[in-house]
Image (cartoon, grey):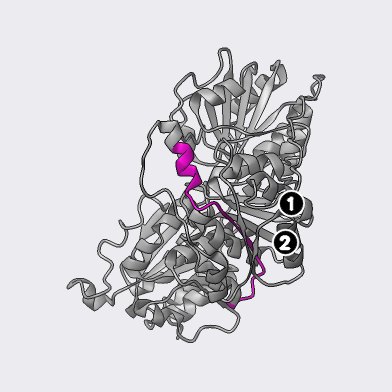
Amino acid sequence: MDTIHSCTYELLRRQGMTTIFGNPGSNELPFLKDFPEDFTYILGLHEGVVVGIADGYAQAMGSPAFVNLHSAAGTGNAMGALANAWNSHTPLVITAGQQTREMIGVEALLTNREATLLPKPLVKWSYEPASAKEVPHAVSRAIHMSKLGAPGPVYLSIPYSDWDQPADPQSHWLYDRAVANMGLPNAAAFSQLVECLANAKSPALILGPDVDAANANHQAVALAEKLKAPVWAAPSAPRCPFPTDHACFQGLLPAGIASIAERLEGHDVVLVIGAPVFRYHQYDPGHYLPDGARLFQITCDNEEASRAPMGNALVGDVKIALDQLVERVPDSERAMPEPRHIPPTLSDTVGPLPPEAVFDIINDVAPEGAIYLNESTSTTPLLWERLQMSSPGSYYFAAAGGLGFAMAAAVGVQMAKPERQVIAMIGDGSANYSISALWTAAQYNIPVIFIILNNETYGALRWFSNVLGVSSVPGIDIPNIDFCDLAKGYGVQAFKATSSQEFREHLKASLDMKSPVLIEVNTIPPAN
């Protein structure tokens, strides 16, 4: 007779989820026993790193990843990473071991009290099966819920005594279930949008991460070229939805209310696709839009559609909507927009490098199709100015701004895309949140190139201190960390660069190593 254990593994196998990311505790051992030979277990040394690796893997694969955490404490450790996954619409099926059913009521050690409430509001659904026989159905439901509509994390708390129990004989119906979005937006509202775009004098496109997640980048290019419209990446972009070397591309929108309206001055129709309206950051009061402008939004997310402070929203499948727009919007006779200004490459220098020089060298040396993970938050505008990103799935950033994302997610992205080189650019402040991801990269020989931009400070906090007009704030400087020594302790080769030439040489050498490498570069804070 099948057990809950064997039935669940067969369900995961048939759904193509044979990689499990975790850090086990005693509650998880009964699930992991007799681990199938056709499955892979990826061990992280901290649950925040585990979820970060799974986040990168799921985003790059475009399908759910399976995570196994340790009860309440492990879930708590992972919450920062879960915030990023929630905001990036990452489909994660997160399970956490619960105390045996006989001991939950007395709250024995490692009981997850009110387990379904713990991960909220950062999951689409959380559940603890009422009986052991319900576990396979709950796992099946979680898999499908994670990817339907707006994708996102889901959470199951499973008592460890359930795994040896007999399964419902009818659980086999779950194995090959397929559930799919149909998703074209409302026909009348969509026709109105097509008409507005056709009649617009100066339309503008703002594209977000869901365009890249849907692999709809080529459709976005086709629409921009038909409209001859300027294209911006939405504020605080966690992915790159449009080729940065395309003539229509105007760069990354700022994250302030008045600043966005200023950039959109002169445009009468603004179409936002696959992004919130908008992911603001600093308080920059003003008009949401320039006078006379109309805004439309296409999103897969009901919540994003409902919370936008202006404009009309259409909820549906982003890729299908773009396909239809390309088919129905007429070609414009307007001239193409003026290309954005590309700053000149900096000359070689010695000593702490300007971050611009680091990005120039990466742009020059990185192979075609490289994938970039960014968590050098104070230098992000410079990165968008200087790195050429032309292929889908070329860029990932922490969608909630939670530090610790890039170093962990880079490992998962490289696992998902072994044919492309992953290069992670990480500030010294950010790196300390997930430094143990280096161990996982070393143990599984995942050949990420980690570049640490070390300016011995939380650069983003220095910038935001100026925005807020505050001074004499403690806890902003973080001197005396040797990342090369840390990397070597985790089993990763490491090099220190003190000049442009050294950095270039180390980066070129790293590309040939086919193993994880860390390069520490001393940098100066960005000028602005």
* Residue type at the position of mark 2: Leu
Within 10 angstroms of label 1, few (less than 14), some, or many (20 or more) residues? many
The image quarter in which residue 135 lies: bottom left
Observer-nearest residue: 277 or 509?
A: 509
Q: Residue at x 35, y 80 (%)?
A: 26
Tell me if residue 116 comes above or below residue 273 in the rendering. below
Q: Which residue lies furthest to the front in this view?
A: 350
Q: What stretch is highlighted in magenta?
A: 443-464
* Residue 241 in view in this figure: yes
Q: Is-magenta flag for residue 446?
A: yes
Question: Residue at label 1?
Answer: 361
Indicate the quadrant containing the N terminus: top left, top right, bottom left or bottom right. Answer: bottom left
* Residue type at the position of mark 1: Ile
Question: Residue at label 2?
Answer: 507
Q: Which residue is drawn at 42% across and 55% down?
A: 80
Q: Position of residue 200 (x, y in %)?
A: 69, 17
